[in-house]
Amino acid sequence: MRKTMMASVLALVSAPATLILATPAFAQAERYSVSETLVGKLIDDPAAAAVLEKLIPAIWANSMFQSGGRDLTLKMIQQYEPSLTDEKLAEIQAELDKLPVND
């Protein structure tokens, strides 16, 4: 009887852990970020690209931004572009925050 009771307790205690481990982890949808999202991801999303084209047209028109900038964030690019001020990044972030959450 004691062995049966112990086995039942162990089964109950380990069941939640098994369920947690067996449950697939779903990535949370995330918002775009001027400091964390790569420019390439922003360029590839038409809505985000429209924000960049509207708010930083001279940078947008630069072929280096369109190609070499893809693997950088806007915050990283800021050191190379004097017009990409903290205020401009805040303005871009505010517009990106208005976009629907992306998957």
Image (cartoon, grey):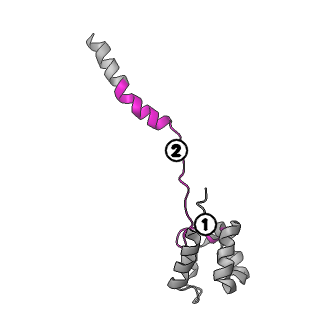
Q: Is residue 93 above or below residue 31?
A: below
Element under disc 2: loop
Q: Is residue 9 above or below residue 33?
A: above
Residue at 53% across / 40% down in the picture?
A: 24
- Left or right of 67? Residue 15 is left
- Measured as percent of width and height from the top left, residue 88 is found at 55, 83
- State whether residue 76 appears in this view: no
- Amino acid type, label 2: Ala
Q: Sequence order check: which comes first, mark 2 or mark 1?
A: 2
Q: Which quadrant holds the N terminus?
A: top left
Instruction: Give the numbered dot on residue 25.
Output: 2
- Measured as percent of width and height from the top left, residue 75 is found at 54, 77
Residue at 68% across / 66% down in the picture?
A: 45
- Highlighted magenta segment, given as a residue range: 12-40
- Measured as percent of width and height from the top left, residue 59 is found at 67, 84
- Amino acid type, label 1: Leu
Q: Which residue is mark 1?
A: 99
- Please tell me which residue lies in front, 92 or 77: 92
In magenta segment, residue 21: yes
Q: Distance of mark 2 from mark 1, alpha carbons?
A: 25 Å
- Please tell me which residue lies in front, 49 or 22: 49
Q: Give residue 103's quadrant in the image.
A: bottom right
- Measured as percent of width and height from the top left, residue 7 is found at 33, 18
In magenta segment, residue 16: yes
Q: Is residue 92 above or below residue 37?
A: below
Residue at 60% across / 73% down in the picture?
A: 72
- For discs 2 and 1, the disc positioned in front in the rendered view: 1
Q: Give residue 14's quadrant in the image.
A: top left
